[in-house]
């Protein structure tokens, strides 16, 4: 009792693969006697031949891609903060610090201009380096 021909015709009619075609065990004699497509079509309508649902790939274990910390950053050092942006941030903060000292009267205007040009030249890596330079040179007024 081979049902390969019936299975193949049913797969063609059901528009699926032969592995998805199932036969009702109680109607195997009817299925075996069916040799035309019309008979197979009638058995499909009766429910003696049916197809099982397609298996999919489960997405249950799929973890959403989350960015965590600096290790997940892509690109080099200068793709995170471009060189120019870093320069602008550094120079603006140093200039703000110099203006604050000048407005308080702690820094002479001539010294302010000199330090301003040093900042523009990129002599200082940070505000801390600028403070250290001012302290080492003794440019701050004592009385103020």
Image (cartoon, helix red, strand yellow):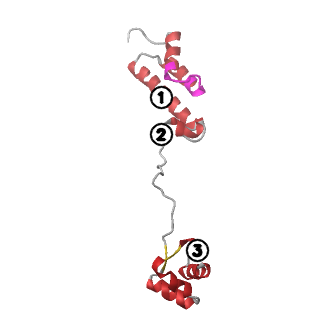
Q: Residue at x 57, y 71 (%)?
A: 19
List x then y, in percent, for residue 98. 47, 23
Residue 43, compared with residue 51, is above or below; it is: below
The residue labelled by disc 2 is: 68
Check whether the beta carbons of the residues at disc 2 and disc 1 lie within 8 A of each other: no
Range of the magenta residues? 118-128
> How far is the residue under mark 1 from the one under mark 3?
73 Å
The residue labelled by disc 1 is: 93
Mark 1 or 3 closer to N-term?
3
* Left or right: 61, with 5 as reference point: left
| Residue 69 painted magenta | no
List x then y, in percent, for residue 117. 57, 24
Res. 18 mark? 3
Tell me which corner region of the image, top left, top right, bottom left or bottom right, holds residue 114.
Answer: top right
Q: Nearer the viewer, residue 41 or 105?
A: 41
Q: Residue at x 49, y 12 (%)?
A: 135
Of the 4 image quadrants, the one containing the N terminus is bottom right
Mark 1 or 3, closer to the camera: 3
Mark 2 or 1 closer to N-term?
2
Q: Residue at x 57, y 42 (%)?
A: 74
List x then y, in percent, for residue 94. 49, 26
Mark 2 or 1, closer to the camera: 2
Check whether the beta carbons of the residues at disc 1 and disc 3 lie within 8 A of each other: no
Q: Residue at x 53, y 36 (%)?
A: 71
Q: Secondary structure at mark 2?
A: loop
Of the 4 image quadrants, the one containing the C terminus is top left
Res. 69 mark? none
């Amino acid at each position: 009792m081979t049902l390969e021909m019936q299975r193949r015709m049913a797969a063609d009619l059901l528009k699926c693969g032969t592995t998805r075609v199932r036969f009702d065990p109680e109607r195997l004699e009817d299925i075996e006697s069916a040799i035309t497509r019309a008979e197979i079509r009638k058995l499909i309508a009766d429910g003696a031949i049916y197809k099982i649902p397609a298996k999919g790939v489960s997405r249950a274990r799929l973890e959403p891609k989350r960015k965590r910390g600096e290790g997940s950053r892509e690109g080099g050092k200068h793709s995170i903060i471009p060189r120019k942006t870093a320069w602008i941030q550094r120079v603006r903060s140093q200039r703000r610090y110099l203006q604050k000292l000048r407005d308080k009267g702690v820094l002479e205007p001539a010294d302010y201009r000199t330090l301003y040009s040093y900042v523009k030249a990129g002599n200082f890596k940070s505000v801390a380096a600028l403070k250290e330079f001012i302290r080492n040179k003794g440019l701050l007024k004592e009385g103020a």
